[in-house]
Amino acid sequence: MGEEKQRDGHAGKNKYAVACSIIGSIISILMGYDTGVMSGAMLFIKEDLKTNDTQVQVLAGILNVFALAGSLTAGRVSDWVGRRLTISLAATIFLAGSALMGLAPNFATLLAGRCVAGVGVGYALMIAPVYAAEISSAEIRGSVTSLPEICISFGILVGYVANYLLAKLPLVYGWRAMLGLGAVPSAVLAVGVIAMPESPRWLVMQGRVEPALAVLRRVCDTAGEADVRLAEIKVAAGIAADAAASAPHQPSSVGKGVWREMFLHPTPPVRRILVAAFGVHFFQHLTGIEAVVLYSPRIFKAAGIATRSEILAATIGVGVTKTVFILTAILLVDRIGRRPLYLSSLAGIVASLACLGLGLTIVERSAPHHSPAWAVVLSIATVFTFIASFSVGMGPITWAYSSEVYPLRLRAQGASVGVAINRVMNAGVSMTFVSLYKAVTIGGAFFLFAGLAVLAATFFYFLCPETQGRPLEEIEEVFSRRWRERRRSPAMAVELPVSNVPDGKAGP
């Protein structure tokens, strides 16, 4: 009977942590919706506002340029005002951007709205996985830190469906309605954020230990586990583990010296953490995911799908595939680990991109309307296998892995830099893809992405250790061994207790 109650309590506490993470991740729907809806809206914007290909590329990529600015400031802001208020700020900024885009009378106003929305996206991408990582336990952290990615995918799917449904409106209203609807999730989040607790780790950094303990007791199985987790967080924050929760504590110097520690005088473990965390963000978009999602209508058109309604219907299939396979990843990531999912994902990505490049090359070199049926089928099918492969591993694990590897003192601002790198790569791909495929052919562009995916797999295999099941406060120790030593004895690197590796003794 007692065991049954304990199991029920365990499920309830985990459900509470998951619920908090879901509410915090709603902000990521905004990013996904914007990406999905813009892929279709660009068809109508080009017709209504008479934009050229250069303007289309700028419109597609400018959001990521301003997301870069947002992400670089979001870490410091979240250290100042807390994780919860940062989510609220992100929603407010995106609300303003969506209103501007929905009411835009011309291209300049549309571009301005997209710039404002980009800042909100930068905040959202940084804060959602950090909040999820800090509110959850080690046992479910991989799943809940993947929630922002499923929310992005759900947003993309909603965007595709909105394109299909709103395409029937008059041209002058259709694309404006598509973009203006992005304000809806912002309003939902503004209400939902009230029910969320603050991150217990941020509260400890502020010296507010007793409120942090109250939050932990709501997300842990037992009071004893909450006390253990609090002690670990206090040590990570520089507070004596045996200090009473009700005793007054001085807040740590939040955010001060972080950039110096990361970039000027990093310890060997911190250096390896930064290489791993920044590297997964660097490679994520070099596989061409943004090109496929944002320009999928053009890819389907190149593959032989003719009418606009058929193209938009096919993009809905892309959104459904992305959502289903990210849900699969969420179910698997805490069971089989980050590395197996990520590396198997990349194997599928390389195969899909190579086949997509082959199919599109054959279609492109064939006479109009006389492409071999097998090449058309291969091109369309491999778009879906690519999306599935990316979504089951590389997509969600990039955010889960990068949000959990940083030490507490570096987490918010380290995550900011990681998101900034992610946005730079995203903008680079989305703003150059049309020019790239015109220069090297559309098939050649995907052969290039396949080669870059091989580099990504090599990087992750050698430089990114497994973090499954480790408390956040212990992950720094995983990186305390040299890369070569960790490759020789990966099991030891995971099992070795923290106290066995003196700080600062490991070499580069």
Image (spheres, rainbow, N blue to C red):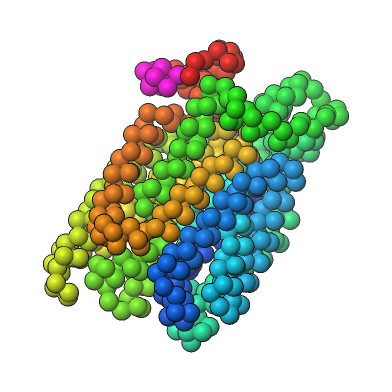
Residue 240 screen position, x and y as percent? 76, 21
- Front residue of 441 and 461: 441
Looking at the rendering, which quadrant does residue 307 occupy?
bottom left
Q: Is residue 215 above or below residue 435?
A: above
Q: Residue at x 55, y 36 (%)?
A: 404
* Residue 490 colored in magenta in the image: yes
Q: Is residue 352 at all visible to an observer of this figure?
A: no
Q: Residue at x 33, y 38 (%)?
A: 455
Q: Is residue 207 above or below residue 76?
A: above
Residue 194 screen position, x and y as percent? 74, 56
Q: Residue at x 57, y 18 (%)?
A: 498
* Residue 391 colored in magenta in the image: no
Q: Residue at x 69, y 51 (%)?
A: 86
Drawn side of residue 213 relative to residue 312, left or right? right
Q: Is residue 480 at all visible to an observer of this figure?
A: yes
SS majority, magenta: helix
- Magenta stretch? 482-491
